[in-house]
Amino acid sequence: MLKDLPNVSASHLDMPDLSKLEPGEVSQHAPRILLLYGSLRPTSYSRLLTLEAERILRHLGGETRVFEPQGLPLVDSVAADHPKVAELRKLSEWSEGHVWCSPERHGTLTAVFKNQIDWLPLESGGVRPTQGRTLAVMQVCGGSQSFNAVNALRLLGRWMRMVTIPNQSSVAKAYQEFDADGRMKPSAYYDRVVDVMEELCKFTLLIRDRSDYLTDRYSERQEAHPELATTLAAAAMDHETGATNADTDDSETE
């Protein structure tokens, strides 16, 4: 028991230091990035923005996958072994970082996008398909620039135990920002997308070999190894009993 922290189990408490942040082995493969978007429209600006981000990531040395939400059933309407659900979960397990892009609809992200995240469990069979991954968030707007969708995506990323990077992209009047071939026109909006993808790559390289340690939690160590606390509590009781017996020993000489 810690004197100043009586509610803390010392055997489960980790003392952070720089040496523990040094990875045992530095990964040499390209950063693995999964990109998700939130619209099924034939002309989907969230999809076009996602594909533009993918091109930038590939140029920066990333390995990318874009999940196509068409055909993904509503969450819980089918079993989790449905081919589209299995594909999505496998891609998230493969990934080291995500890019999430949604249109803003009625002041928040779309149901199409949320359905994809709802199919990703926090944990399944000891595997956590999102925890410790990096995350970049983007949105497209039909009118003036707004940040409601990216704010909702940030909240969702925190819930999924992801490391959301500080930068983000919100493209106003998205229908004006792409040419007839679906490529994004030069603009300050495009430059911001480059900023965000650069930052995502840097954070992914920084975190991917350290994510296990960064997401190792005191409360979960307690749940995984309750016997440590029990053993220490028993040892403390034995010590107290021994001390009490010594204090009451008639043969003790003062």
Image (spheres, grey):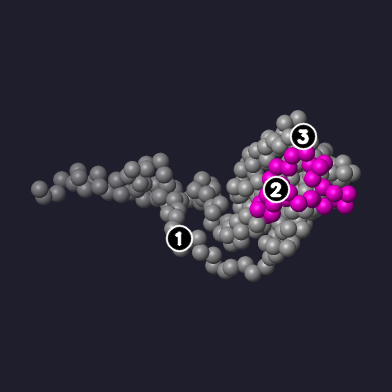
Residue 81 visible here: no
Q: Which mark lies nearer to you, 2 or 1? A: 2
Label 3: few (<14), some or many (≥20) within 10 Å? few
Residue 157, picture quadrant: top right
Q: Determine which of the numbered discs, if any, sits on residue 18 in the image.
A: 1
**Tag 3, which secondary structure?**
loop
Viewer-side residue, 84 vs 237: 84
Check if residue 182 falls in the magenta segment: yes
Q: Position of residue 130 (x, y in %)?
A: 66, 50
Q: Determine which of the numbered discs, if any, sits on residue 188 in the image.
A: 2
Q: Which residues are magenta?
A: 169-197
Taking 216 as reference, is 114 above or below it? above
**Taking 232 as reference, is 78 left or right?**
right
Label 2: few (<14), some or many (≥20) within 10 Å? few
- Which residue sits furthest top? 106
Q: Amino acid at mark 1?
A: Leu
Q: Determine which of the numbered discs, if any, sits on residue 143 in the image.
A: 3
Q: Which mark lies nearer to you, 2 or 3? A: 2
- Which residue sits furthest front? 187
Q: Position of residue 63 (x, y in %)?
A: 73, 62
Q: Position of residue 98 (x, y in %)?
A: 69, 52
Viewer-side residue, 166 vs 228: 166
Check if residue 19 falls in the magenta segment: no
**Tag 1, which secondary structure?**
helix
